Structures are given as structure tokens and as C-alpha cells.
Amino acid sequence: MSWQTADLCDLHRSLLQVAEPVFHSYGGLSRIKASLVTVKLYEDNRALRALLSQPGEWRAIAVDVGGEYCAVLGDIMAGLAVENGWKALLINGYIRDSAQIRTMPLGIWALGTCPMKSAKVADGTTQVPLALCGLSITPGDFLYADEDGVLIAPHHLT
């Protein structure tokens, strides 16, 4: 069945959270639905790299960078995501190598781009609740994203 975020909002308004309109689509896939894994970073992308090195099983990762202006994902890590079967990333932060990432079969929504890579200063935390951009995300929630916006549901809807 084909779906759109607008239709999901019409059908399931009481179940959905709608992200603030701050995310931009950068990946080669512009429509994604997937179960979420979470990671909280502290200006350091090593925890994200570790996740992307594991089998993704067609899941997505919600990433909270804590407002630091640095790229936590570039073409090498996006390639790792594709290689290991991850479907998408929702990044409350920035990416780089956007031209290369646009060609990859991966959904990526981020705040923007930044050419500076992240520092290696503090470990991240995985599988924790996140509060970002008007969303409260719990590991296992479901991401729906397309050209119209980003939604979070407590379970699979379609």
C-alpha cells in the first residue's frame, strides 16, 4: 500500500508526533518508514559509527547531536550504513559530503550541512529516549518521513 505523511496525519492524528519543520532531506531515498534505534552524541560520532557497523535490518537511527555545529555523518559513514542494511537516519545535527550522500540508497534527514567533522571528545549513548525538534522518541518508535515532513508513531501504522 502506498502512503504519504499527509494521509497518515489524516488517519492517525492522535497517534502521531510531527517534527518541527527544520529537517532537510539529503539521502537518495525521499520516503521512509522504519523502526527506530536511538543515539545521543556529544560532539563525537564514534557511537554512531559503532551502530552503523552493526546489521541495520532495515531500521532507522534517530540521532541527537545536542546542538553542536559539526558533521556527524559523511559519505564514508553513509556508505557503511548502506553496506550494513540501515534504511535511514534522522539527525538533529549536521552532515557533510551531501552531493555523494544524495546518490546513496539511504534516507537522511538532517538540520543542514557543515564541512567540519566531529571531534572525538565524549562517548555517546545508545537506545535512550530523545527529545528533539518537538518530538519525544523512544527506541522502537516508528519513523515515517517523506517530502512533506517527519512523523513519529509508537508503532507501525501501514
Image (cartoon, helix red, strand yellow):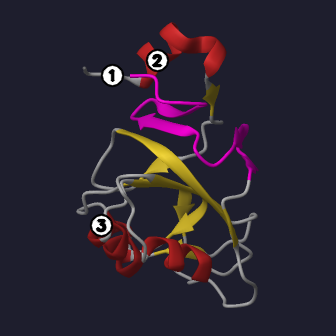
Q: Is residue 119 left or right of residue 89?
A: right
Residue 144's label in the rendered image is none
Residue bearing the label numbered 3: 82
Residue drawn at (37%, 60%) of the image: 86
Amino acid type for the residue under numbered disc 1:
Trp
Residue 106: x, y in percent?
32, 57
Residue range in magenta is 129-158
Residue 128: x, y in percent?
72, 57
Q: Is residue 46 left or right of residue 29?
A: right
The 10 Å Cα crowd at callout 2, few under 14, some 14 to 19, many 20 or more, is some
Residue bearing the label numbered 2: 8
Asked whether the residues under the numbered discs 1 and 2 touch, taking CB atoms below 8 Å apart as contact, a structural biologist would say yes
Q: Is residue 15 magenta?
A: no
Instruction: Compare residues 38 and 8 and report the one nearer the observer.
Output: 38
Residue bearing the label numbered 1: 3
- Between marks 3 and 2, how big is the CA–CA gap? 27 Å
- Position of residue 140 relative to residue 85, above or below, is above
Amino acid type for the residue under numbered disc 2:
Leu
Of helix, strand and loop, which one carries label 1? loop
Residue 77: x, y in percent?
41, 77
The 10 Å Cα crowd at callout 1, few under 14, some 14 to 19, many 20 or more, is some
Name the N-terminal-most of marks 1 and 3.
Answer: 1
- Between marks 1 and 2, how big is the CA–CA gap? 7 Å
Of helix, strand and loop, which one carries label 3? helix
